[in-house]
Image (cartoon, rainbow, N blue to C red):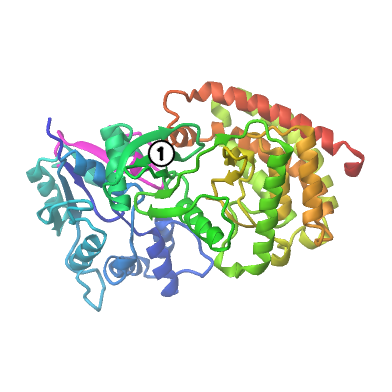
Amino acid sequence: MTIRIGIDFDNTIASYDKVFVDVAREQHLIAKEWQGRKGALRDHVRGCSGGEKLWMGLQGQVYGKYMHRARLAPGVANFFLRCLIRDIPVFIVSHKTEYGHYDAEKIPLRVEAMKWMVRLGFIDPQRFGILRENIYFESTRKQKIERIVALDCTHFIDDLEEVFFEPNFPQETNKILFCCAADITNGHEFPVFHTWTDISRSIFGEEKLQDVRVWLQPMIGDQFNDISRISGRGNSCVYKIGTADAKNFALKYYPDRLLDHRPRLQTEFRTFQMLHKNDITNVPKAVNKDEHINLGLYEWIEGESITDPTIDDLEQAIDFVKNLLVLSREIDGNIIKLASEACLSADDLIIQIEGRFNRFSGACGSSPELSSFLEKNFKPLWDDIKDKCYSLWPMGSRDQILPREKQILSPSDFGFHNALRGADGKLTFIDFDYFGWDDPVKLTADFIWHPAMELNCQIASEWEMATLDLFSNDSEFNARLCAAMPLYGMRWVMILLNEFLPGFPERRRHAGHLNSYDEYKSRSVQLVKARRYCKRVEKISSQPTYA
């Protein structure tokens, strides 16, 4: 069967969530602090006096005057490229009128949409290669359905399930509902997908090396001659790229932005650039990136994983943190955002732990073991230590943000698990996609608690003493660390149990853990670790400091 794929445009290819919120805020339809997605915004505006007219007017503005602000939906670029290299024709069929409702400026919606597609390379044969004559704008939904029939589409992808319920929608066409908000479940006769990555894999299967070659073309041209996939990375997929001139690169394919909204590519790429610019060079060099495909190209670091860290390794880690501390006091702090899940107060930390705990409520129904652990082990221990630790936390940062002068630029996932030891014994630190401002107490505690390292007592003790010296200018650092250690232990218990959360297996699949990942075995292993961590928390919280 010859595949012919039809795709809707608005809210399927072009993503407007941020545009809708920004424009609504600019037009004073919502308060500055309002947060939410497009669906929630629609309900909010419609609930106002004259709300239906206001909403239709807002749509006209977003799809016309502000069309240039729209973003390509995460994963669409990859899908287009996979179609291109397989010679699969793509047809864009949009129900879009000439002008927006209640738009006094009469901005031509179709012209703006076409300009946006041209700018992003839709019809460029060197980019997505969609034929201009394969892009259709129809004035009514009926005409849209007629076009789908005329094009003989084998698949059609849309964000509106109503399209598939139209009486004339061709029954032989495979219906694919794209719903990134994850508020529609698969109760239909057709599949529902929450990411473009999943749509792509449902049609083409897992990414193959031929796909990677197409990704690389605009990044380094034709100079590569060898591609191999690297196993063992957590959530990202990494490839080793060999070139004709014997240079090697690491190509990092980051998690789908609809599964993980954090700008991990942008954060890591800019961080490596910034660190090298400031003479911190024991991190990879950033070479190139493609934000639409969510790819970063970096210098390849030859080295071995560190499974049994030595004192020399520890000293290099301490020196690296020392350099970050110096940079933190010299750089313009406003150009760097907070680290992922930064904890700048006791309240921040406690709210994070309780937020993670609440997320497991939906997962407990499918796992009696998880439910039992949370109710019989975690919850009683948490109730016992939370107030004790909070009372020991210095008053200045209990419920107030730690001042910038006491913060540090932190990798946020720092440790030997994210380092490589070269043949000369020198360490290179990798994985900085969570980088940003944070409390050095979190950096210190996470280094000790991180389950990927299993530090021996000597290394852990030496690390703690070194950080007490490094941050001695902060008179409350020691007290904050003592108060925080049991809490960070409980936070790591929650992180260990991420395996039980919806969507986690998809992350593992993205990272290439296809044959080795056993969801049920992994959950069992993580529960064992979580119980062990609770015992460690009990032990340190029973010491005199916490009495």
Above or below, 34 relative to 510 = below
For the magenta stretch, what is the residue range?
169-197
Question: Whole-percent x and y of residue 389?
Answer: 81, 47
Question: Whole-percent x and y of residue 344?
Answer: 69, 57
User: Is residue 349 shown in magenta?
Assistant: no
Residue most extreme to the bottom: 105
Q: From where the camera sits, is residue 160 visible?
A: no
Q: Nearer the viewer, residue 58 or 408?
A: 408
Above or below, 255 relative to 455 = below
Question: Whole-percent x and y of residue 273?
Answer: 50, 59
The quarter of the picture where the C terminus appears is top right
Q: Quadrant of residue 1?
A: top left
Mark 1, other Cα within 10 Å: few <14 / some 14–19 / many ≥20: some
Residue carrying label 1: 240
Q: Is residue 3 left or right of residue 320?
A: left
Above or below, 223 relative to 96 = above
